[in-house]
Image (cartoon, helix red, strand yellow):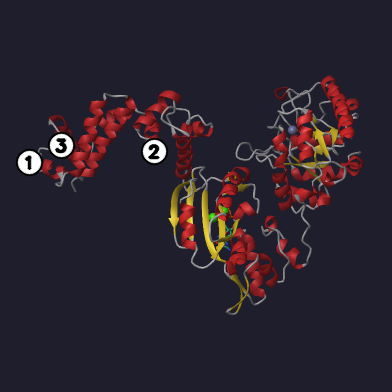
Amino acid sequence: MAIPNVKIAEVFDELADLLEIEGANPFRVRAYRNAARAIEAFPQNLAERARSGASLPRIAGIGADLEGKIRVIAATRRLPQLEELGKRVPAGVRALLKIPGLGPKRVRALRQSRGIESLSALEKAARAHEIRSIPGFGIKTEERILTELARQAGHEPKRLMLSVVEQSAAPLLAELEAMPGVARAEVAGSYRRRQETVGDVDLLVACGPGKAGDIIERFTRLEEVAEVVTKGGKRSTVLLYSGLQVDLRIVPEPSYGAALVYFTGSKAHNIAIRSLALRLGLKINEYGVYRGTRRIAGRTEQEVYAALGLPFIPPELREDRGEVEAALRDELPSLVTLADIRGDLHAHTLATDGKGTIGEMAEAARELGYEYLAITDHSRHLTVARGQTPDRLRQQLKMIDRFNARLAKTGAGITLLKGAEVDILEDGRLDFPDSLLASLDFTVCSVHFKFELPGARQTERVLRAMDNRHFNILGHATGRLIDRRPPYAIDVARITQGARERGCILELNSQPDRLDLNDIYAKAAKEAGVRLAISTDSHSPGHLRNMRFGVAQARRAWLEPRDVINTLPLEDLRKLLKR
Ligand code: DGT
Ligand code: CA
Ligand code: CA
Ligand code: ZN
């Protein structure tokens, strides 16, 4: 088979690309591109004519030099000149050209201004927002690059952190709710279950008859939509510029509850309730609950669960971790809510690595309606965070006393607690002398270095630290950072047991990339009889609002208000923190 004209054209296009990346004479580059267009459009197969020895037809713009090249390609399917060029331009640079939207000009700019010569370097720069400022690029291009990279990363779609997904999903939901014809709308899936990371966003909409088409149309034309993957009468899948995939499904109002149960999942929970339905002689699917052909429920989730003889099961519990059995026994936990939280027990200020003053932090906590906020700046060992010496801490404590006096006078209704985030040293000692620790209301004690210790030693280190009766709360017990750092080797079950024996508290750190302890460990801690503190570890006043992420994980861990010490009124909390 002779090589088709389009393939010959591709060789010339590639030649032009590589020359352009190298900064060759623009006239030469244009000559190759023009030739490619002319060859592509030529009605007869050029390679066949060349191989038959016949002279090539005269094609505008193709002189003797190019004709010679066509003959070589026709005979060998290769072009030595291109192979030479290919050796000079690194493979990583050629891979950049495969990203839609990146032509040779842009690849050249990426290379020259930022030294980007591979897909991984491109991704790094895009994530660091270094692309948008290159002349000829912008924010949209940068986002598009990330979307494309995520897609090319293959069939293992990247999971995004819940807090990151929230920034796209919440406005999207608001836009859907405002569309004409939309009766109900909700984000379902792992997002609604508040899983720490989310694969894709599942939007569910209920509307009246005949409205679905218009809603799909408006949805696919939303500004944040980068690409429409599928579009049907009742559903659509799109990719956002942020790289997030979104599935939209539209159902009639009488099926909304059943669809919400189905698309909230989890899959394991769905399977568990389906087998319960079968045992009851019922059938359940995304349209409703049926006895025979008669539909007996479907409009609301409550109705669906009630048809199965169950109370409403909160989405955070729907993981088939015993919730169906507990619901059958009517023993579902009364999950902790954000409204139950009376204060925050982990916050930093300008004294160490925080961005707010004590006053600003106190004001932000007061706005949230808190009764108390603990100031817990770092101890001296953590020099990178300007950890405080004993003297600096003593000064800070005096300042807190003055603040509390003033807060009491103004009737602000909030008290600052005197704390510190004390480093756990390698041998398990705490980073401040006991005499100083004794002057605090309580401590958060954390591991911030020597992450690489073997599991037995890391575990022993923390247990030794807990032996100190000034140890109250273990901060971010595993040290993991979602997507960035694995947990250190530590036996969480032994630490949990150790905390129970010594009356220590475990933290559920609410920083969106920590969520440490995670839901599984936190549930095990509750079952072991250990109480938790849901804390934000705030480094600025705005961070105090991260409490909702911690509470969501606490709910996934089946925690009730009584399992969480910062649901206690201040005086009860003070008593509890006396070991
Ligand atoms: P993700 O997106 O990976 O973070 O996790 P989900 O839970 O959002 O999963 P997704 O988006 O694949 O599907 C949304 C929900 O739809 C899922 O939680 C349960 C339901 N679902 C999907 N596929 C199946 C299935 O094969 N069987 C059953 N019973 N339910 C399914
Ligand atoms: Ca999903
Ligand atoms: Ca999905
Ligand atoms: Zn901290």
* Secondary structure category for the residue under label 1: loop
The mark that comes first in sequence, 3 or 2, is 3
Residue 524: image location, x then y, percent: 76, 50
The mark that comes first in sequence, 1 or 3, is 1
- Quadrant where ligand 3 appears: bottom right
Task: Find the distance from the CA under tag 1 to the CA under tag 2.
Answer: 40 Å
Crowd around label 2: few <14 · some 14–19 · many ≥20 (10 Å) = some
Residue 287: image location, x then y, percent: 57, 69
Type of the residue with mark 3:
Arg
- Asked if the residue under mark 2 is in contact with the one under mark 3, i.e. CB atoms within 8 Å, the reply is no
Q: Which residue is mark 2?
A: 101
* Secondary structure category for the residue under label 3: helix
Specify whether 229 is left or right of 43.
right
Specify whether 144 is left or right of 395.
left
Asked whether residue 396 appears in the rendered view, the answer is yes
Q: Which residue is mark 3?
A: 71
**Mark nearer the viewer, 1 or 2:** 2
Specify whether 65 is left or right of 578.
left
Asked whether residue 377 appears in the rendered view, the answer is no
